[in-house]
Amino acid sequence: MTESERLFEEFCAGLGICLERIETRDNRTPDYRIWPLNAEVVCEVKQIEANAKERRALSAAVRGEYIVTGGIPGSRVRRKITDASPQLRNLAKGRCPALLVLSAESFLRRHLDEYQVRVAMYGLDTIIMGVPRNTAARAYAKDRKSGPKRKMSTERNTSISAILELRRHRDHTIHCTVYHNKFAAIPLPHKLLDADHVRHLRLRKKAAGEFDEWEQM
């Protein structure tokens, strides 16, 4: 059992949610069924692991050194969506909500912040530039929107109702953020996970010239 699975089981136990571990069948099935308020929800639990570059950076930090790292925003979450989608779709499509549950060690939690999850789900922030015919005039921003590398759309990953991010705070309480998928075929009802230390976020209505942003439900 991974640390993420232990954290998820503890989270469910704390909320009094019935849980069933699903027997693995060639990685074609998700990890769990849960029954919050007697409603079935299918869950796949994934853990963000350090890659080789991050392990080197952590070792350097322990030695008091510094190393610069980078990457494409949302890439780690994007990969987990790709991995989990077939498993969740196989069991949940047309039947019940499905959750992708993610967690990471403290030094990797930047991969699971609100921005990283948003651009993984809906695409990288993109600025549409206007170029005046008058070459003496400056180019200007016509609009801002979510652009390439989106994993959620009306045609893609509609079986995933939400991404659920878990983290343990220093006081040992488990905090949860639920990122609702606006394109979910079967949305997750807010009331199923309505508890202390649980936040529900959805995309707010976008105004012209703004990037997509989360709002609390």
Image (cartoon, grey):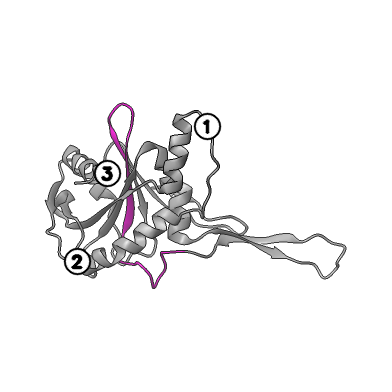
Asked if the magenta segment contains residue 157, the reply would be: yes
Query: Is 144 above or below relative to 66?
Result: below
What residue sits right under mark 2 in the picture? 91
Q: Residues within 10 Å of mark 2 (few under 14, many from 20)?
A: some
Between 54 and 16, the one nearer to me in the picture: 54
**Amino acid type at mark 1:** Glu
Q: Residue at x 17, y 57 (%)?
A: 40
Q: Main secondary structure of the magenta part?
A: loop
Query: Is 171 above or below relative to 17?
Result: above
Query: Is 2 above or below relative to 41?
Result: above
- CA distance for labels 3 and 1: 43 Å
Q: Is residue 207 left or right of residue 200?
A: right
Q: Is residue 168 left or right of residue 118?
A: left
Mark 2 or 1, which is nearer the eye? 1
What residue sits right under mark 1 in the picture? 65
Residue 181 visible in this rendered orientation of the protein? no
Mark 3 or 2, which is nearer the eye? 2
What's drawn in magenta, residue-wise?
150-175
What residue sits right under mark 3 in the picture? 194
The x, y position of residue 144, in whole percent, is: 61, 59
Counting residues from the start of the chain, the first of labels 3 and 2 encountered is 2
**Amino acid type at mark 3:** Asp
Mark 3 or 1, which is nearer the eye? 1
Q: For numbered disc 1, what is the local secondary structure?
A: loop
Q: Where on the picture, by quarter, is residue 27?
A: bottom left
